Amino acid sequence: MARTSPTVNVMAAAARKAARALNRDFGEVEQLQVSVKGPGEFVSTADLRAERTLKTELQRARPGYGMLLEESGAVEGTDPHHRWIVDPLDGTTNFLHGIPHFAISIGLERDGEIVAGIVYEPTRDEMFWAEKGIGAYVNDRRLRVSARRQLGDAVIGTGIPFRGRGDHPTYIATLARIMEATSGVRRLGAAALDLAYVAAGRYDGFWEFGLAPWDVAAGLLLVREAGGFVSDLAGGQTMMTSGDVLAANGHLHLPLAALIREAMRSAQPAP
């Protein structure tokens, strides 16, 4: 059985406490007060309540740490080395439509590097967690990325840009290329869980453009600690700043990257 550290215990306890209210709200999703945050993007009372709980619990356990929260933004801490990166409800649109696929994501950054992370899916009580050098787990079970070697056998996750966001023609070009080359593409609407699914071998790979740091902080570490590879779409490590992410096992990462880059070039208008 995996032994969790005090840091992971703090993260998991905060997530479980916030999840209790999320589960109650999910059972009454039609009664939620919802305000528009931007085109196609919503914030609910559930988001805000979960974020307040996470902020309170994490600050109580580690009072000096800074924070980056999806709804509240940056909070400076007295400890210059550590920062929590928090998404209180990844998959908000799923949540508000009664689709049981959403998660709480917490990453711990130390001197610019993610060293611990959890992604908690409340409706299935799956706690994905990882620490640098320790491995990745779901609850007590060790995770490994899939061993598939051929793109033709692979199922790949993605995130589709919605109304008012992203470069739709470029995305459609990458989607078409990957559809032609693989066994299937899935879009489930929660990037933190998509990355957790790569770590668990449920997906063989995942790509998306324009994600926020709180969408990916924990998931990036999960994939790495499960033996996978994560990069931006150029093969670099700018995922937290560019928001462009490609994750896969070691056999499929480079072929997927080549397909995506080729598709992106083909989508550019001729000079």
Image (cartoon, helix red, strand yellow):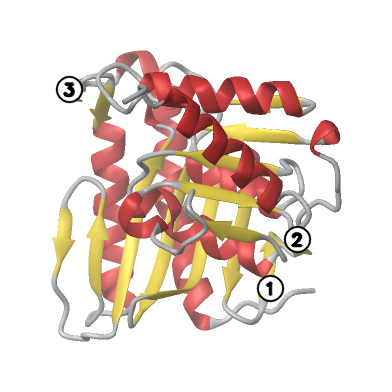
Front residue (pair 193, 111): 111
Q: Quadrant of residue 165?
A: top left
- Tags 3 and 2 touching, CB below 8 Å: no
Q: Is residue 246 above or below residue 139?
A: above
Number of labelled discs?
Answer: 3
Q: Is residue 79 above or below residue 210?
A: below
In the displayed structure, does residue 190 sit left or right of residue 210? Answer: right
Q: Amino acid at mark 3?
A: Ser
SS class, disc 1: strand
Q: Which residue position holds label 3?
A: 35
Crowdedness near tag 2: few (<14), some (14–19) or many (≥20) residues, C-alpha within 10 Å? many
Residue occupying the point 26% across, 72% down: 59
Local packing at callout 3 (Cα closer than 10 Å; few below 14, some 14-19, many 20+) is few
* Mark 1 burial class by Cα count in 10 Å: few <14, some 14-19, many 20+: some
Q: Which mark is residue 135?
A: 1
Q: Label 2, on which residue?
A: 143
Q: Does the residue at mark 1 contact the one at mark 2 (Cβ under 8 Å)? A: yes
User: Which of the pair 192/246 is nearer the observer?
Assistant: 246
